[in-house]
């Protein structure tokens, strides 16, 4: 985003939001910001009319909409569909910028090593970690998966968070100066790997039970319900109040365009009190910037806990790999004070390179790479079966959360991403998804039942890129049908509409999703 955020100057409710108990709760802060919705000051009146026209919901399902096949506008890649389709750069990226994209790709794939090492500028791994590279969690820039059979759990991890212990911590949550609190022994994430001489924290343990769901036409679908535990705890018991939230890595495509969506367009779709009575009460995740104290809209992560790609990348470096950067100076990664052996190990900080293990331009190049990974063009967007499925997707109410399209900011910092008609199929808001998908973990404004609506673009290429069809935040769904049937809470009405369709109509709706 360019310039100051329209949220930065919005007044907090009831005094200084930093006061917590004496000021506002996290929910009150969010509601006060939503009631003072920002507007799009990047558009002229002529542009505003154009944007309203092209982003209106579809009403004619006899043909594809204009530009519908170009999921990411001019940035859409038309490269051949193969396992590397998610690793292409944006089609409108200038030639002179391709070098930075390729440098960022090399750093994204770089394997870090433990300290000390003769491989200078590549050491600093861990000491506790989940992966040695970004690529390990996002193979070919695609979707992660839960461990199945002999596969490891590199692209799945547990987020850890405990309840606040005292008034001071409750005030931090209330004022959004903290999203939640780490386990005192294990930190914010369970690390299943460690450098030589150190014990890993533990590993993900999952068992499943099958639950039968009978659809309206008599067909039965089996849903697998996961049960989570930790095996091989290496540093004593978890805090009794610590919650485990399993997460699989999300696809990397289109992230720069998501960052270029104007805050006003995200706020415009929010309805936290469900005043229109449609059962959908999505709300934006609001994040307080650690440096400035300003409010920003969360866009990235399963609970929209990060407002910018750079912050998302910095947190992944620090927590997943154990590498410090200018935006997250934690050279011992997620090691806690209780893990004295971990804290005593050497770091990879090289004095001649600066005070962190991944100094600029490393973080900037990785962020640039992530920002410019292209969205593939649609397949079969104008085919009759696809159009039929699209109509059913609309009629079932799926677009209430999976908003089809936006036009990005005129003043986006990268002109390639500015004023593009894009089709992410997400409102980027937090929604209550019901008890079946609840993880019980608060992350800032998001409670234990709420998740950000994930973008659907590229979802039909999951098998091609990632070699599987596991969906949802923990990969429990083995196909798109199961993923839809797990929807609850605000999405239960749409889920029930899908379950009530005849088999041929359900197949058509899935065909539409596979075209995205």
Image (cartoon, grey):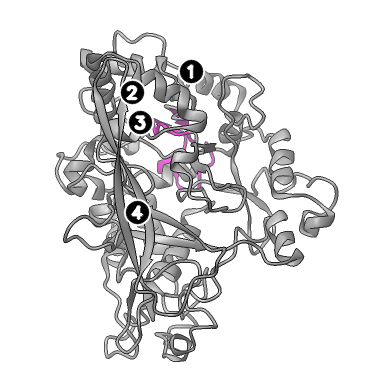
In percent of width and height, residue 198 lies at: 35, 86
**Which label lies toward us, 4 or 3?**
3
**Which label lies toward us, 2 or 3?**
3
Q: Secondary structure at mark 1?
A: loop
414 inside magenta stretch? yes
In percent of width and height, residue 245 lies at: 45, 55
- Upstream in the sequence, badge 1 or badge 2? 1
Q: Residue at x 46, y 79 (%)?
A: 236
Name the residue tied to disc 3.
484
Q: Secondary structure at mark 2?
A: loop
Q: CA distance from mark 2 to mark 3?
A: 27 Å
Pick the residue in front: 374 or 32: 32
Pick the residue in front: 443 or 110: 443
- Upstream in the sequence, badge 4 or badge 3? 4
In the picture provided, is 345 more to the left or to the right than 140? right
The answer to which image quadrant residue 114 occupies is bottom left
Q: Residue at x 54, y 51 (%)?
A: 307
- Upstream in the sequence, badge 2 or badge 4? 2
Name the residue tied to disc 1.
56
Above or below for 273 versus 463: above
Q: Secondary structure at mark 4?
A: loop
Q: CA distance from mark 4 to mark 1?
A: 32 Å
Q: CA distance from mark 1 to mark 2?
A: 14 Å
Numbered circle sitting on residue 67 = 2
- Please report contact status of discs 1 and 2: CB closer than 8 Å, yes or no: no
- Please report contact status of discs 4 and 3: CB closer than 8 Å, yes or no: no
* Circle 3 residues within 10 Å: few <14, some 14–19, many ≥20: many
- Upstream in the sequence, badge 4 or badge 1? 1
In percent of width and height, residue 177 lies at: 67, 60
**Which label lies toward us, 1 or 3?**
3
Numbered circle sitting on residue 249 = 4
């Amino acid at each position: 985003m360019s310039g100051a955020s329209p949220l930065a100057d919005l007044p907090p409710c009831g005094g200084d939001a930093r006061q917590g108990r004496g000021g506002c709760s996290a929910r009150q802060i969010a509601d006060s910001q939503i009631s003072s919705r920002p507007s799009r000051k990047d558009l002229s009146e002529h542009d505003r009319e154009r944007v309203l026209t092209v982003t209106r919901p579809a009403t004619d399902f006899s043909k594809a909409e204009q530009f519908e096949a170009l999921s990411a506008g001019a940035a859409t890649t038309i490269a051949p569909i193969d396992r590397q389709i998610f690793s292409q750069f944006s089609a409108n990226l200038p030639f002179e910028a391709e070098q930075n994209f390729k440098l960022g790709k090399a750093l994204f794939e770089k394997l870090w090593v433990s300290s000390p090492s003769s491989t200078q500028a590549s050491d600093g791994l861990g000491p506790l970690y989940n992966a040695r590279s970004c690529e390990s969690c996002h193979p070919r820039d695609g979707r992660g998966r839960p461990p199945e059979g002999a596969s490891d759990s590199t692209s799945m991890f547990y987020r850890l968070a405990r309840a606040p212990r005292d008034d001071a911590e409750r005030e931090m949550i209330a004022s959004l100066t903290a999203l939640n609190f780490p386990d005192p022994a294990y930190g914010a994430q369970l690390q299943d790997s460690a450098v030589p001489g150190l014990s890993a924290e533990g590993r993900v343990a999952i068992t499943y039970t099958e639950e039968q769901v009978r659809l309206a036409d008599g067909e039965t679908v089996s849903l697998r319900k996961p049960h989570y535990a930790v095996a091989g705890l290496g540093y004593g018991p978890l805090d009794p109040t610590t919650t485990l939230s399993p997460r699989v890595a999300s696809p990397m495509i289109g992230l720069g365009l998501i960052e270029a969506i104007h805050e006003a367009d995200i706020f415009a779709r929010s309805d936290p009190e469900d005043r229109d009575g449609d059962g959908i009460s999505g709300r934006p995740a609001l994040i307080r910037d650690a440096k400035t104290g300003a409010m920003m809209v969360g866009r990235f992560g399963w609970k929209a806990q990060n407002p910018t790609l750079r912050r998302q990348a910095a947190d992944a470096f620090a927590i997943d790999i154990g590498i410090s950067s200018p935006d997250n100076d934690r050279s011992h990664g997620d090691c806690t004070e209780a893990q004295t052996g971990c804290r005593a190990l050497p770091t990879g900080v090289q004095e001649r390179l600066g005070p962190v293990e991944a100094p600029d331009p490393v973080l900037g190049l990785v962020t640039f790479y992530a920002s410019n990974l292209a969205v593939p063009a649609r397949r079969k967007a104008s085919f009759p079966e696809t159009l039929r499925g699209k109509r059913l997707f609309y009629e079932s109410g799926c677009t209430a959360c999976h908003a089809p399209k936006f036009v990005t900011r005129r003043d986006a910092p990268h002109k390639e991403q500015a004023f593009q008609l894009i089709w992410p199929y997400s409102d980027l808001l937090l929604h209550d998804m019901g008890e079946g998908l609840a993880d019980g973990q608060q992350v800032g404004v998001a409670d234990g039942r709420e998740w950000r609506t994930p973008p659907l673009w590229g979802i039909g290429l999951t098998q091609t890129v990632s070699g599987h069809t596991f969906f949802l935040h923990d990969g429990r769904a083995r196909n798109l049908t199961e993923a839809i049937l797990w929807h609850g809470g605000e999405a239960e009405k749409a889920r029930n509409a899908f379950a009530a369709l005849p088999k041929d109509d359900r197949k058509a709706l899935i065909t539409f999703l596979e075209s995205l």
